[in-house]
Image (cartoon, coloured by chain):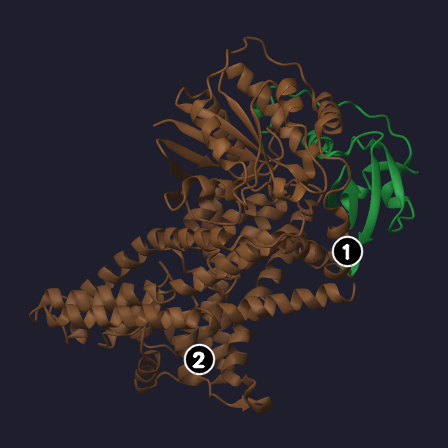
Amino acid sequence: MENILILGNPNSGKSLLFNRLTGLKQKVANFPGVTVEIRSGQFEAFTVQDFPGTYSLAPLTPDEDVAVKGIQKYIESSQTKAIVCVLDGTRFERSLMLLLQLIEKSKLSGRPLIAAINMMDEVNGKSSIDFDGLRKELEIPVIGISARTGEGLPQLKDTIKSVQPLKAKLSESLATPLSLKIRARDLHHQFGPKGDVFLKKQNRLDDFFLSHFFGPIVFTAIMIFLFQSIFSWAKPLMEMTSGTVETLGTWTSSHLSEGMLRDFINDAVFAGFGSFLVFAPQIFVLFLVIGLLEDSGYLARAAIILHKPLSFFGLSGKSFVPLLSGHACAIPAILAARTIESPKKRFLTMIAAPFMACSARLPVYALLISGFVPATAFLGGFITLQGFAFFGLFALGIVTALIVTSLLDRVSRKSASLNMRDTPFIVELPPYRLPALISIFRNSFNQTYAFIKNAGAVIFSVSVIVWALGYFPNGSGHLDTSYMAILGRAIEPIFAPMGLDWKIGVGVLTSFLAREVFVATLGTLYGLEDAGENLSSLSTQLSEHGMTAASAIGLLVFYALAMQCVSTLAVIKKETGSYKVPTLVFISFSILAYSAATVSYWIFK
Amino acid sequence: MDSDNHSQLTMPPPILIKSGTLLSKTPIEAGCEYVIESISLTLASDVRQRLLELGFKEGESLICQRRTPFGGPWIFEIAGTVFSIDSALTSAIHVRKK
């Protein structure tokens, strides 16, 4: 099948064009994240490839590196039908740089190139673009489109289908960045829009969003809204998922006769994997809100507001988006760190991301807080002690991450062998725009689906292993004589200083593969079929089996700090290209978590 | 990062002669316009190339818009696009006031 490449600068609207061309027929390669994924989809008989935005064919960030390597590969492939370069008509001169570089490349390979000048709905009325002049000058098809309104898309589709390969040029171009820049300036003056299409409106909004007084207030309000939305907007969806899992579990049980298969489906599939699925809506809502903020142009402003405070801890304003994503999952967060140019700040961001209170920690927090923290209300019920405990755990992760990155930054500055390359901070401020809701909704859905598919395999496997170890050799109801009991008692001395018995120890041990397995493991071990859905009953079981408030606090601290996620370690290995980094991260996070948890237990005992 | 593998059509950025005052040592005021005299050679070549691609080149006008909260990066308008740059960059750009 022939490929069509969609390329362009960041924020040029190419993802929206991709969605317009492919509709629902698309998939996200690798784990999803903000601007780092390569997506593919179907447009009629073609496969459309959407690459991360890049300013140039000389990459500066790892995500641009992904894009440029992909471009190289596809430009040389005979399976490439056409390359569509998306330009932002409102920032025309800057967009022309990449187009001019691509023209040189496509002439060399003979692959046809189409220039799609986007945002024409915003350009029209304020200015105009001379398309005929550009076609003659550049000798390629130039089409004005609006991915938002659909304007010009039929013409673009026809051009994609009918475009013919170019006659390949044999010699390499001698164009320099400076000569290309001068040509882009000339083309802009000759054929581009006249005057500022956007800047006045953008400046007025920045006067408010970046003001010294309102800027930080608005930022704080938006962050509160974001975290609130994760809990409140996701709640009905979580209840719906939980109800569906429960109904399916009951229905399946009623249609199976008693025996090993029924026990397996109840305890491993529905209690284990089902309890993980319940938390998928929170991940969806987080992707949705981040998508809204990114599309509106606010995320770049948030990164700028936070640049100075984060610099103190060795990070960059660009670390903000990965760390924000880390509250859904550390994996997209680590991948999103690719957008950071500075290798040093990127590394520190990757180390900080796993400390963020990811959604996999939420079921553990919910279980222990509901069972051991009183629901005392303050300020007329506006704040509860349980809510405060949640906030404290989020804050513990963030503060620990900042202390760790700060220490690493200072140590690396003093040690020549540890010092890494640092590059200056430069961020383009995209225009403020109304978000394209349908496109964001669709992207969030695709990203959540990709997350479930990738993480689900590990969680399902762990659930099956835990169930098998707890079931055999004597079957259901004989946990105390199972292989799991033998294993649990062997490791009990390790967890005894934290005030935990062997069953909790087994829960902690299995959750080193994935944190969310903890609730399902305990559910299985205590003989509950619906562990993920009836958290309060499981917490009652915990206190009945001797767990105290002090050991619950110790366990919460442990979960806030420990590196319990095989997938995250695998992604760190992939991103750093080293086994040493994830090994050191695992060991140091575990020692830190164990020590802090033990100290907390003894303080509150 | 290996940027050279992917920049066959590009050449090293031109060597710019140091002149003008460093932006970081210029009293920057919102609304003021500056002209770029040169970019410091202390910056890595790939960073200089990116700056050039974004429009930071000799003779280009730089309009200061504002400083961000908490004493953060400055915001400048250049060639119809708005950028935020930190002190590491303002101390590598030589300018004169227009």
Question: What is the chain letter for disc 2?
Answer: A
- In the shown orientation, is residue A244 left or right of residue A205? left
Which residue is at 69% across, 44% downward? A428
Q: Is residue A15 above or below residue A547?
A: above
List x then y, in percent, for residue B53.
Answer: 70, 31
Q: Verify CB contact (< 8 Å) between mark 2 and mark 1.
A: no
Nearer the observer: mark 2 or 1; the answer is 1
In the displayed orientation, state which residue is furthest to the front.
A125
Q: Which residue is mark 1?
A: A204
Instruction: Give neighbour class at mark 2: few <14, some 14-19, many 20+ (Cα, 10 Å).
Output: many
Regarding residue A418, the answer to whether it shows in the image is no
Q: Quick one: label 1, few (<14), some, or many (20+) residues within 10 Å?
A: few
**Cα gap from disc 2 to disc 1, whole angstroms:** 45 Å
Q: Measured along the vertical axis of the image, is residue A166 above or below residue B61?
A: above
Q: Nearer the viewer, residue A388 or A498?
A: A388
Residue A122 percent across, percent down from the top left: 65, 44
User: The disc numbered 1 marks a residue on which chain?
Assistant: A
Name the spot of residue A504 as percent of width and height, x first. Answer: 33, 73
Residue at 60 percent across and 32 percent down: it is A59
* Residue A372 x/y as whole percent: 42, 84
| Colour in which the image shows chain B | green
**Which residue is the extreme one toward the top?**
A170
Query: Which of the labelled discs sits on residue A595, or is there none?
Result: none
**Residue closest to the eye, A340 or A344:** A340
Q: Residue shown at 76%/22% (left/top)?
A: B14
Question: Judging from the image, what secondary structure is the residue with disc 1 in?
Answer: helix
Task: State which chain is coloured brown.
Answer: A
Is there any visible trace of residue A158 in the rendered image?
yes
Quadrant the N terminus of chain A occupies: top left
Residue designated by label 2: A369
Q: Report the amino acid beneath label 2.
A: Ile
**Quarter occupied by residue A138:** top right
